[in-house]
Amino acid sequence: MDALVVEHVAKRFDALVALRDVNLRLAAGEVLGLIGDNGAGKSTLVKIICGYHQPDSGRILIDGNEVAIRSVDHARSLGIDTVYQDLALVNELSVYHNMFLNREKLRWPFLHNGLMRRLAEEHLRDMGVTIKDVTVEVAKLSGGQRQAIAVARSVYSDARILLLDEPLAAMGAKEGALILDLIRDLKQRGNVSIIIIAHNYAQILEVCDRVNVLQRGEITFDKPAAQTSVAELTDLVVAEYRAARSARVTLEGDANRGRPLHP
């Protein structure tokens, strides 16, 4: 059974059509790469799945059951969580406090810091994330380590469907490798289904089972990662860019032909 199915989802913001007719499926334990040019609607789709936006039409099924996702909190209660590029971590707080942000353990009337610290160390170690000292402020960690903490926090909160929005953006090779290894580990466990939005097609093909391309508000391409290539994915996106540029030039030319000439 598929963990997530999106059927005929559409979304517009006033005159802007963000999503026209999106059909997407995510199998249980699968890692799906979602790519597309800037403005293709990838982030809008993620925000609908995680409850931040409501679709204008279409439906979403979780584990075969249709659901109307009312809010981000409702999505989390259904096992859907999102890790954005900006991470939503508090830099001034420690690693373990970030791990339990808004889910703090209490020993009334105080925070149970000892328990949270121990649980954070155990969970990060189990996931293969190396943080020498969980009492250190998040601001002092590398980008890769911060991203790993954000992913680990979502998994620790029992997320079964994880949406990663540009998890590798602005990272060096070493930091990116840390996140790719973490995704591989989650994939091997098989208890989390993942959608990754990324612009680096080589990294997408390295860790994903399947790839979707979102263009003009629709999924136009759906293939197993082993059956496509960086060249094919690049050609698809470049062809869309050239078509859009050609259409824009034509419109500008038509508009200019109707203008009066000035001496």
Image: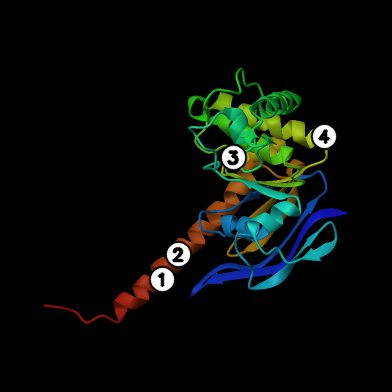
Residue type highlighted by circle 4: Arg
Q: Which residue is mark 3?
A: 167
- Identify the element where label 3 is drawn: loop
Report x, y in % for residue 62: 80, 58
Image height of 79 relative to 185, above or below: below
Label 2, label 3: how far apart the Cα atoms are: 32 Å
Residue 214: assigned label: none
Say which of marks 1 and 3 sits in front: 3
Label 3, label 4: how far apart the Cα atoms are: 20 Å
Lower position in the chain sequence, tag 1 or tag 3: 3
Q: Which residue is mark 2?
A: 246
- Identify the element where label 1 is drawn: helix
Say which of marks 2 and 3 sits in front: 3
**Quick one: which residue is furthest to the front in this view?**
109
Label 1, label 3: how far apart the Cα atoms are: 37 Å
Report x, y in % for residue 4: 78, 56
Residue type highlighted by circle 1: Thr
The crowding category of the residue bearing disc 4, from other C-alpha atoms within 10 Å (few below 14, some 14 to 19, many at least 20), is: few
Lower position in the chain sequence, tag 2 or tag 3: 3
Residue type highlighted by circle 3: Pro
Asked if the residues shown at circle 1 and circle 3 are in contact, with their CB atoms under 8 angstroms apart, the answer is no
Q: Which residue is mark 4?
A: 189
Q: Which residue is mark 1?
A: 250
Image height of 65 relative to 56, above or below: above
User: Toward the viewer: 142 or 207?
Assistant: 142
The crowding category of the residue bearing disc 1, from other C-alpha atoms within 10 Å (few below 14, some 14 to 19, many at least 20), is: few
Asked if the residues shown at circle 2 and circle 1 are in contact, with their CB atoms under 8 angstroms apart, the answer is yes
